[in-house]
Amino acid sequence: MIRVVHTADNHLDPKLGFMGAKAQERRLDFYKSFLKVVEFSLETRPHILLVSGDLFDSVNPRNPIRTRVLQAFRRLSSEGVRIFAIGGNHDMPRSQEEGMSPLSELEAAGYVTFFSELNQFRVEHINVEGYDVAVTGLSYDHTLEASSNPLRYYNLKIPLEGDVNIAMLHYNFAGFNIPRNWAAPTITPEDVPEGLDYLALGHLHAHSHAVIKNAYVVYPGSTERRSFNEESDEKKGFVYTEINPSRGVVLRFNEVPTRRLRTVEVQVDESVENPTARVLASVPAPDPQMILRIVVSGRVALERLSKYSRAEILKRLSDRFFYTVIDDSELKCIIKEIRVSLDTASPIESYKQYVEEAMKNASADELSVWKRALNVGLRVLQEVGAW
């Protein structure tokens, strides 16, 4: 029986500069989730650990995480675990200027077999309990169009050279639930050869699997939620597999703890007196461990726009949640129609009269908005030739 741990899309050292002081703690979430894979592997001592792409979030992760991963793989290697890896769309270079994948360093250290090839299969053989286990894979090719099939484009077939055959790829697979914005080259069921035992996939962040021609085709999913696209993913983790050439495959998903993400949608309309208050009243109960996204949409009258403050919302929620994101791109401003008579006043004079009249009833906060509207409006009217 061949024991295999399969992980992918760990996205170590993600780019999180926008999170400010919380960035380092959030990066640590990704490392802790990956560490669960390592700890499980040290406890169970599988024969093989498969890393199916995007171990790192970029081709240039910082030195501390490189060192931690090197130390983890050195420990696993010393326990007899054979580690195989491919590069994904995040940790494979797009050009020569980006240099080499950070996975090359792990291979150079002697702890990982890295299938860096893009257009040809290389097969590694290991003997496990008297069985010849053949492992192969391809790394992600950035030169391919999203509509292409990488195997057919290069006229490749997955090689079958062992008693047990395992292949690794980091692409979409037709028939799985592929998110709309997850465009990538796609493998099809027809590309799975008879005699393949396990196809270790990466790229899709939700765990799923299928059995095609007796081969287990498996996405372990990511080990941490990288974006709100994964908010609805119930669990994150990795896969433990036992391959018995005479009895088949046993698959087990192992969940890892992750940080919760939640989206709240807030709709505002002309009747809302204070948009900021409406948003604050709509957020859920405080949860210092949760990342909250607030999506604000609707139409707000111009005279009430001064009462909407993204900065105030973020300040009020800073200690209630781990981090808050506000998307108000669909919040629109209503500008009332200005009716003027050309017989009595010019466009510029009419605009000044309208704004000055509104300023008479404006509060102190609204007054600054109206003053700015007056200056901007007059400048625009002059630029287009109004009198």
Image (spheres, grey):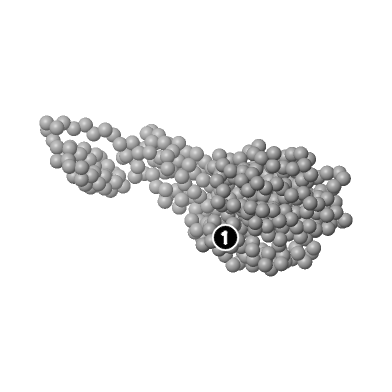
Q: Position of residue 152 (x, y in %)?
A: 64, 44
Q: Position of residue 277 (x, y in %)?
A: 43, 42
Q: Which residue is mark 1?
A: 59
Q: Quadrant of the C terminus?
A: top left
Identify which residue is drawn at 38% across, 33% down: 271
**Residue closer to the observer: 285 or 22:** 22
**Residue closer to the observer: 288 or 132:** 132
Vertical placement of residue 111 versus 117, above or below: below
Say which quarter of the image contains residue 346: top left
Vertical placement of residue 358 versus 123, above or below: above
Identify which residue is drawn at 58% across, 43% down: 148
Say which quarter of the image contains residue 96: bottom right
Identify which residue is drawn at 85% across, 54% down: 131
Whether residue 239 is visible: no
Q: Position of residue 263 (x, y in %)?
A: 54, 42
Could you tell whether 39 is left or right of 382 in the image? right
Q: Position of residue 100 (x, y in %)?
A: 58, 62
Identify which residue is drawn at 18% across, 32% down: 340
Instruction: Please identify the residue farthest to the front as the structure is shown.
Output: 155
Could you tell whether 96 is left or right of 375 in the image? right
Question: Could you tell me the amino acid type at mark 1?
Answer: Val
